[in-house]
Amino acid sequence: MTAIPTLEELHALGPLQQPTYPDAGAVDTAVARLRTVPPLVFAGECDDLTEKIAAVTRGEAFLLQGGDCAETFSGVTADNVRNKLRVLLQMAVVLTYAASVPVVKLGRLAGQYAKPRSSDLETRDGVTLPAYRGDAVNGYDFTPESRIPDPQRLVDVYNSSAATLNLVRAFVTGGYADLRQVHTWNTDFVQSSPFGQRYEAMADEIERALTFMKAIGADPDEFHRVDFHSSHEALLLEYEQSLTRIDSRTDLPYNVSAHFVWIGERTRQLDGAHIELLSRIQNPIGIKLGPTTTPDDALAYAARLNPDNTPGRLTFITRFGAHKIRDGLPALVEKVTAEGVQVAWVCDPMHGNTFEASSGYKTRRFDDVIEEVQGFFDVHRSLGTWPGGVHVELTGDDVTECIGGGEEIDEAGLANRYESVCDPRLNRVQSLELSFLVAEMLRKA
């Protein structure tokens, strides 16, 4: 089926994690506006990403997906976007050079403004208000006015995403992503760390190789720019459905809000609205699989979301937790592989490892993140399958949100610079450290 389901049809399926808007007329106004805006991405770009993820599915490439837990409107600045792009470029260079594998670069940006929550309400000091569901829905400030869901914010998401993508495209095509910039991507606080120094040594090797190749007349275009794609969780139906359009080339529906969209752990009901909507679009898509997922569930998702078994169409993003990955993942991989299902396997080592520190901050241990990635690689190595990528919440800034890593951030240190409005992110030093450790795992794989 290729028709776009209507919002009425989707809401009839009882979708979860949707805001309750007090003004239906305002919702209609926002949706009508979104139906008229230009696409943020093009169908041909989505098809190109599908081909790249098909290479991941075949074991010929590795997917690096990263960015904010939840983007904010105030975060749409040139410096902030550049810093996130910079750390992803650094990580991709480490993975490509140290592991000798092509890296598909997928930003968790330009649309990641909504978050599912475990409760509709939040209580502080005896006051109960609607939970913060991301800037796409309401404000972070704990006031009645701020926490009212406002559909105009959906239009603000579009405008902020357009500005972010404009900046990203300018950076990746305007010289910033040139491989000859490998040294300038490093900054003082990274250079002072052991992994920053290791990066500098690798950058020296890359620079010598580039100089040699230029001397013999080899200077391909790939050295001067990168392909970079956008992604976010397809959570808010008003936004995602409004930005699903029929492509004029193929007469098929594409979600033009991002190149890649995924279904989260809380909204992956087989008969639910999110699976219904994403089953209709042509974009490459993902689905988060947690520890409650059975092998039969995985097969059912594949049958529903990728009935033609097209390589690159479907990515399984596993999020088990460091202490469950080795027990829970093998049965899924074994059955999916035995049935000949074409899927890219990607590890999300963040969401299964969150806990509350004694100081009250939500955090993650860097060691747990690494342990889950290592378990992911170990399972695939034992089964002879390809560990296709990592999906990481990170920032390009020097925040203190996750415990451990080379900087040895402890629970007391979380208060130094905790800036996330939702889940804790790896900072730039931790992200670079992760990339070197994953590169070592890839070499063995």
Image (cartoon, grey):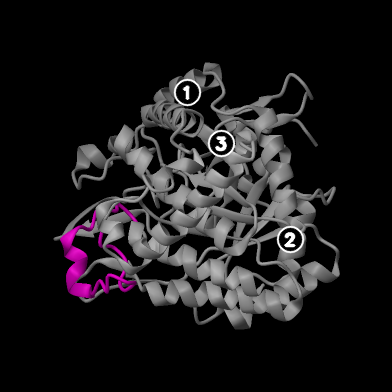
Q: Nearer the viewer, mark 2 or mark 1?
A: 2
- Is residue 122 rendered to the left or right of residue 296? left
Q: Position of residue 276 (x, y in %)?
A: 68, 44
Question: In this view of the protein, can residue 283 be seen by the observer?
Answer: no
Residue 357 position, x and y percent, is 26, 74
Please tell me how crowded label 1 is: few (under 14), some (14-19), or many (20+) other residues with Cα within 10 Å.
few
Q: How far separated are the C-alphas under marks 2 and 1?
A: 45 Å
From the viewer's side, name the closer residue of 75 and 195.
Answer: 195
Quote the CA–CA distance across marks 3 and 2.
24 Å
- Residue 191, compared with residue 352, is above or below; it is above
What amino acid is at disc 1? Asp
Mark 1 to mark 3 CA distance (whole Å):
22 Å
Q: Is residue 330 a member of the stretch shown in magenta?
A: no
Q: Which amino acid is tagged 3? A: Ala
- What amino acid is found at the position of numbered circle 2 in the picture? Gly
The quadrant in which the C terminus is found is bottom right
Q: Which residue is mark 2?
A: 59
- Going from the N terminus, do you reach mark 3 or mark 2 first? 2
Element at badge 3?
Answer: loop
- Looking at the image, the residue that sits furthest to the front is 215
User: Is 401 colored magenta in this rendering?
Assistant: yes
Extent of the magenta region: 399-422
Q: Earlier in the sequence, mark 2 or mark 1?
A: 1
Q: Which residue is mark 1?
A: 28
Residue 214 x, y percent position in the rendering? 58, 39
Does residue 90 appear to the left or right of 310 in the view shown? left
Task: Please give the residue where the numbered disc 3 appears in the rendered image.
Answer: 258
Comparing 232 with 445, the one in front is 445
